[in-house]
Image (tube, rainbow, N blue to C red):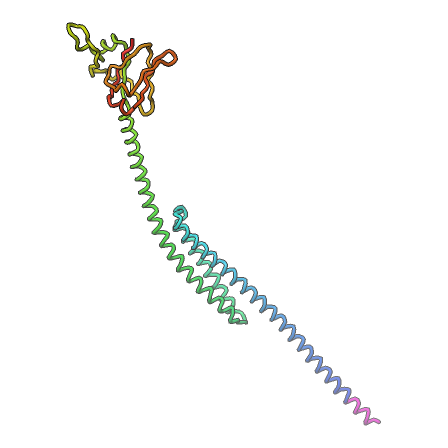
Amino acid sequence: MRRATVLLSILSVALLATCLTFYAKMRRDADAMTALRQSEQATRARYDRAVRDISAIQDSLNAIAVDASQALSITKVGAERRLSPTGASEAMARIAGLRTRIQSLESRLRDSDFRIAGLDRMVKQLKQGLAEKEQMVTRLGGQVESLQTHVTDLTASVEEAHTVIAAQSDTLAQTRRELGTIYYVIGSRQDLVKGGVVAARGGVLGLGKTLRPTGNVDPSALHAVDTDEQTVIPIAATKARVISAQSPQSYSIELVNGRLELRILDPHEFRKVRHLVIVTA
């Protein structure tokens, strides 16, 4: 009996020891599982953050590509207001900022306790894309400077051409006015003879003399009229006749509302004689 009791005690102690061993192992396994789960969560968080950073940097690179295409289209439509070296400088500053972000991402991945080949390839592609964009911006910057110089030269040429055209237009307008302008004087026989504008010539023994313009007219007594702009000359009289050498077919004298008007019917023919003398009665 005593021997059975001892044996039972030994078995109880062995069973208790076995239970304690299993309990300790279960605690270790649970702690390991918790640590593994936490490590997995931390790894996933670092992975997600790295992917977000890579995506953001790639978006920034794509934005630089869009800006470059816009710069190329600008040169085609001739919008020189946007052809400025400042744009290239801004793009280079953005590239420098992206390079810093890529270096920071590389450093963070290198210092972490996990390495993923896919992330390494993505970072390598980012660095390659950044280098390509830098070369592109450098090339476009040179093109922009060249185009800016060309635009400046063209602007100067256009301004010079405008100045020449304006001067030529003024000259042409002045020439047209000179060609289209005639000078006239209106007065009674007595006033015109007294002023030396006309003189009685011809006839026999003082009879049958005809009034003729002398060609000596005081410029202050003349009135200018541009026959391209004005074709009617009012005459403050009830009777009048032209004694200068204008073609009779180039004009007519008409009574309008009780007053006479000389109407120029053929300005080109009429102004072949530059001075018009009208005698009123």
Identified at 32% across, 41% down, the residue is 158
Residue 220 shows in the view = no
Residue in front for this viewpoint, 49 or 159 = 159
The quarter of the rendered structure image containing the N terminus is bottom right
Residue 167, x across and y down, in percent: 29, 34
Identified at 32% across, 38% down, the residue is 162
Residue 44, located in which quarter of the rendered image?
A: bottom right
Residue 115, x across and y down, in percent: 52, 71
Residue that protrudes farthest toward the front in the picture: 249
Looking at the image, how many numbered discs can be counted on the residues? 0
Q: Say whether residue 48 is left or right of residue 217.
A: right
Residue 91 shows in the view = yes
Residue 226, x across and y down, in percent: 31, 23
Residue that protrudes farthest toward the left in the picture: 205
- Region in magenta: 1-10
Identified at 48% across, 66% down, the residue is 123
Vertical position of residue 87 compared to residue 241: above or below:
below
Residue in front for this viewpoint, 40 or 60 = 60
Residue 246 colored in magenta in the image: no
Residue 4 colored in magenta in the image: yes
Residue 195, located in which quarter of the rendered image?
A: top left
Residue 247, x across and y down, in percent: 25, 20
Dominant secondary structure, magenta: helix
Identified at 24% across, 23% down, the residue is 272
Q: Say whether residue 19 is left or right of residue 200.
A: right
Vertical position of residue 272 compared to residue 69: above or below:
above
Q: Say whether residue 248 is left or right of residue 202.
A: right
The quarter of the rendered structure image containing the C terminus is top left
Vertical position of residue 120 compared to residue 85: above or below:
below
Residue in front for this viewpoint, 135 or 165 = 165
